[in-house]
Image: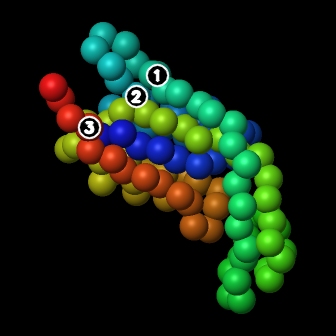
Amino acid sequence: MKLEIYVPEKDLDRLRMALNDLGACRVGAYDNCSSVVTVTGTWRPLSGASPYDGTVGVLCHGAECKLEVVCPRKLAAQAVELVRRLHPYEEPVIHVLPLLDL
């Protein structure tokens, strides 16, 4: 599986290390394998939200990182739960994508 996680840069290393400790981020005989791309995120907190950044009702945008790691299928649910527990966002964006082994 491939995990794509949008996260503030300051939280990147902590999240990657926790995923690595779980058993994700491994490729062959290597661990701590990941890719990071800086992106601009856009969001508008709605009524009832408690945003990490931004103001309710105001369209916001800012820099964040997209962290990409591989994860064994058997660990994917645990990895998502770990990200939700450690992530600073109220609603973290986590994409879990199946990979073909050709």
| Distance from Cα at disc 2 to Cα at disc 1 | 5 Å
Badge 3: residue crowd in 10 Å (few <14, some 14–19, many ≥20): few
**C-alpha distance separating marks 3 and 1:** 19 Å
Q: Which residue is mark 3?
A: 99
Residue at (64% x, 61% y) in the render: 89
Residue 86 seen in render = yes
Q: Residue furthest front?
A: 102
Circles 2 and 1: CB atoms closer than 8 Å: yes
Relative side of 61 to 29, left or right: right
The residue sitting at 80% across, 82% down in the picture is 57
Measured Cα–Cα span from mark 2 to mark 3? 14 Å
Among numbered discs 2 and 3, the one appearing first in the sequence: 2
- State the SS at label 2: loop
Q: Is residue 8 above or below residue 48?
A: above
Residue farthest to the left? 102
Query: Which quarter of the figure has residue 92?
Result: bottom right
Q: Which residue is mark 2?
A: 25
Mark 2: give few (<14), some (14-19) or many (20+) Cα within 10 Å. Answer: many
Residue at figure coordinates x 69%, y 37% from the top left: 38
Does dot 3 land on a helix, a strand or a loop? loop
Mark 3: which amino acid? Leu
Residue kind at label 1, given as amino acid type: Asn
Type of amino acid at the residue the image marks with label 2: Cys
Q: Which mark is residue 32?
A: 1
Q: Is residue 21 visible?
A: no
Q: Residue at x 53, y 58 (%)?
A: 93
Estimate the x, y position of residue 59 in percent, counting from the top left. Answer: 80, 72
Q: Residue furthest bottom?
A: 47
The answer to whether the residue labelled 2 contacts the one labelled 3, judged by CB atoms less than 8 Å apart, is no
- The single residue placed furthest to the top in the displayed view is 29
**Which quarter of the rendering shows the N terminus?**
top left
Nearer to me, 102 or 2? 102
